[in-house]
Image: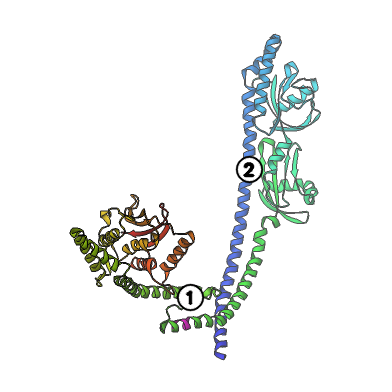
Amino acid sequence: MKPQNSLLTKVILLFISIFIPLAIVGIISINLSNQKLKNQVLTSIDSNNENYISQLNTSLDNIYINMYNLINQSNFRNFSHTYNDFSPYDKRTQVNLIQEQLTGLQIATPLIDSAHIYFFNHAISFHTRGYTFGTYNHLDSNSIRTFKQMTQGKQLSYYYENPISESLSLDLFIAPEVSEDYAVGVTISPYELKKYLKKNSAYKNEGHFLFSDSAFRIDNLPESIEADVVSRKDELIQKSSTDSLFKVKLGGSNYYVFSYKIPSLSAKYMRLIPTSSLLQNINTGPTIVLIFFLFVFVACILFFIGAYRLIHKPLYQLTTAFEELEEGNFSVSINDRKNADFFYLFQAFNNMTSKLNLLIEQDYQQQILLQKAELKQLQAQINPHFLYNSFFMLQRMIKMDLSEESQEMTSALGAYFRYLTRNSMDNVTLETEYEHAKTYSYIQGLRFAGRIQITFEELPSSFKYLDVPKLILQPLIENAFDYGLDNKMENGQIKVRFFCSSTEPNKLTIIVEDNGDDLTDDLLQDLNDKLKRTKKTSDNIEMTGLLNIQRRLAIFSNYNYSLNLSRSNMGGLRISIHLIK
């Protein structure tokens, strides 16, 4: 008992001496990896934000480009200079054209809420939508002064009280360089802008806000930090002027602040992500790893103890099985599926004993089964059902002075018995077996003339020299005479056919079928069940007739040849032998 405890202690100490250094190195590596991962996460978010805001800036720049292209259209200049000279029809035509151009500008991007053109010298404006008075507005002096100031200012955008809609509006303005008589403006949709910015949200409790120089503001902030952000707006903007990424405490929690400029709106966009959400997986990583290492440590200790106690039992089973195998019990097997660790070893042992048993069976049973088959045929020589009747028939032929027929009958009987008594022949060519079957059928055909007709197809020439076990075809024909057509008084038929597919030219099927009336479905099923069992083993099975042939075919061909039974189209039994060249 002491040596066992000593061995277990040594194993555990060895494990600890390896495990602890690995655990320390692992924890240090994980901390370094976490720091690297944190930097990668921050860099990835910064890159994603930059791309997102860059797309917004591109959209705003495209709006300016479209406005610039629109303001320089010749029909705008013509309208501004010759409006009073237009006929009513020309005015309607020009107004419709302007409306189409403004609509095209508006629908170019969802960010535009409405598009406008102001003709200051005529005190009128046209727009796509958004005002009470439709697409046309008269401009009073205050409106003209306000809009002119916007077009002459240096800012790109203005957040102001629109004198026409009498509400706050974020507008972009542009006027032609050669004239100040008219200008084009667009109103940015706060809803679409807020919707666009909101799409760039992925973390719990994060927020963002946008402040412009003209006091325009869009935000989506958690309630816990909204008041703090608004009150510290100037501080955050000032800090963002030096650092595009910084850390700040808002509402009692730490936040990472990502800052970006939006030049077209003279604004700054800031995204605030709580560190707890951003680095949640990283922060909990060391704890999870520590728990994992502890779990592995305990599990390994338990494994060593359990393995030490359980390893003796499967080895004892294996040793006992080898002892039985040594004593000659080749059917021994180990069926312990509960022990998964040794199951593959037990399975290999079982496969080995099974193959040994199969090799022995193939080596000995083929000779035994062949001897049984030959013995059965030799017994038939003294069986009056064939031998006596054949000689009685020969006697009648002689009495009837049928000398030629008697000679043929004598030759056939001689060939038949010579084939049976060649004990040195285990295997023969298919052509030899085929000719023997025809000889037997010729004798039986004379006996049952007028009652049973036998038909043979020609044997395919490519299979004539195929080696097969002796006595596999004639017993099938004998079976048809003795059992299939035993009660058939007239019109009995036996056909021997061959089938070889063009797609599988190396496979041949020999078919022996009759038109007997005594085959029932139950009998056919019973015969098939016996054939299936016989193909695998001959233990506890009386090896006679068809079963003998099935077993010899299986052993001879290493289970490639087989015998199958089915009902013939003529109504009787169909026996098929499947051979492979």
Compare residues 49 and 5 and report the one nearer the observer.
5
Q: Residue 99 in the image: state x and y as whole percent.
A: 68, 21
Which quadrant does the C terminus fall into? Answer: bottom left
For this rendering, which residue is in front, 530 or 60?
A: 530
Q: Is residue 103 visible?
A: yes
Q: Determine if residue 561 is in view.
A: no
* Residue type of the residue flagged with mark 1: Phe
The secondary element bearing badge 1 is classed as helix
How far apart are the two marked residues, 1 and 2, measured between alpha carbons?
A: 62 Å
- Label for residue 502? none
Q: Position of residue 4 (x, y in %)?
A: 55, 87
Q: Position of residue 339 (x, y in %)?
A: 54, 75
The residue tagged 2 is: 52
Say whether residue 404 is left or right of residue 309.
Answer: left
Amino acid type for the residue under numbered disc 2: Tyr
The answer to whether marks 1 and 2 mark residues whose Cβ atoms lie closer than 8 Å is: no
Relative to 252, residue 192 above or below: above
Left or right of 216? Residue 521 is left
Q: Is residue 295 left or right of residue 546?
A: right
**Closest to the observer, 93 or 510:** 510
The quadrant of the image that shows the N terminus is bottom right
**Furthest residue toward bottom:** 2
The image shows residue 228 at horizontal and vertical percentages of: 79, 50
Main secondary-structure element of the magenta-colored stretch = helix
Residue at (20, 62) in percent of width and height: 398
In the rendered view, does 428 fall on the left or right side of 489? left
- Write down the residue under mark 1: 346
Mark 1 or 2: the one toward you = 1
Q: Residues within 10 Å of mark 1 (few under 14, many from 20)?
A: many
Q: Secondary structure at mark 2?
A: helix
Q: Which residues are magenta?
A: 318-322
Vertical position of residue 134 compared to residue 545: above or below = above
